[in-house]
Structure formats: C-alpha cells, structure tokens
Image: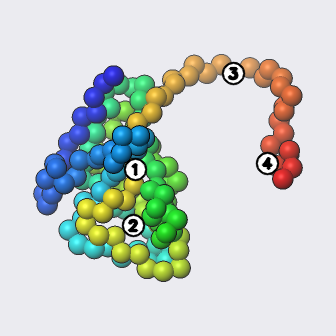
Amino acid sequence: MDKLKVKIISNIYTAEDLLPEYKTEGSAGMDLKAAVKEEIILKPGERKLIPAGIAISLGNKKTVALIYSRSGLATKHGIGLANGVGVVDSDYRGEIFCPLINLSDRDFTLKPLERMAQLIIAPVHIMDIDVVEDLDTTVRGSGGFGHTGR
C-alpha cells in the first residue's frame, strides 16, 4: 500500500502539531486540526472555511481522501461540514480546508489546533461509461424515495 505523503502548510505550527493521526487502533479516520492562530467563533447558521495546515499526496489515482464531520462536534455542538463530505482528489496538491457550519442555535468557539474533522482514505473505482437504451431489470426497478414505506 502507498504511504500518505503530508506537507505542512503553516508558518505558525510544526509538523508534530498538525499531522493527522489515528486516535485509536481501530480508528478509520485521522483527525484534522484547525491551523488557526486565534479562536474562531461560528454563529448559528454561519459557515467558515478553516485551514487544516496540510497538503497531501495519495500516491495513486485509485484512492481518494474523504473529509467527514467529527461525530462529537456534530452531536454536542451542531458543527458539521457545509458540503456534507469533502472530496480530496488524488491529483490535488493544495492545502486542505474544512468548510465548517454551525447548525445549532448557539455560538461555537473553535480553538487553535482543535480537532475539527476526520480524513479517511478510500479506494476509487474508475468506470468506463457505456450509453445504452435500457438497463437490466431488478425487482426494485425504479422505485425510490420511500417506495417501501416507513
């Protein structure tokens, strides 16, 4: 497996401060930290783009880095990602930013180096596209949006 190459993009923090890390042996995601000098206040409904202070190289085009909300911040404080899930393509070399949004009814204070999101590396399946007249049939067919009931 290719190793994740990480470059630190910060004049205020060291590599040790910003390196993403797995917190437990069974963790799927590495925590991304807020590479900010001062506390940032997110008001209810407000979005802010927060730097993670790192850029990455995934090593091959069949991998992607996915950025997810941290469940503790989401459930306790209503803090999520404005784009749902961030996608870092294998050929992107710029700094990673997290578009945080406050979905609660209270101000939230993000502290410098606070863990704000998690990064997961996943395989990508590159598809060949074939335009056809019909698709194969299934029992479900085109039923969707609650077609099986509650």
Task: Give the residue pinned by disc 4.
Answer: 145
Of tags 1 and 3, which is closer to the observer? 1
Q: CA distance from mark 1 to mark 3?
A: 37 Å
What amino acid is found at the position of numbered circle 2 in the picture?
Lys
Give the residue drawn at x 86%, y 44%: 148
Report whether 7 appears left or right of 148. Answer: left
Of tags 4 and 3, which is closer to the observer? 4
What amino acid is found at the position of numbered circle 4 in the picture?
Phe
Give the residue drawn at x 80%, y 20%: 136
Task: Give the residue pinned by disc 3.
Answer: 131
Indicate whether 124 appears above or below 53. above
Q: Secondary structure at mark 1?
A: strand
Colour scheme of the rendered structure:
rainbow
Task: Give the residue pinned by disc 1.
Answer: 118
Task: Give the residue pinned by disc 2.
Answer: 48
* Residue 134 in view of the camera: no
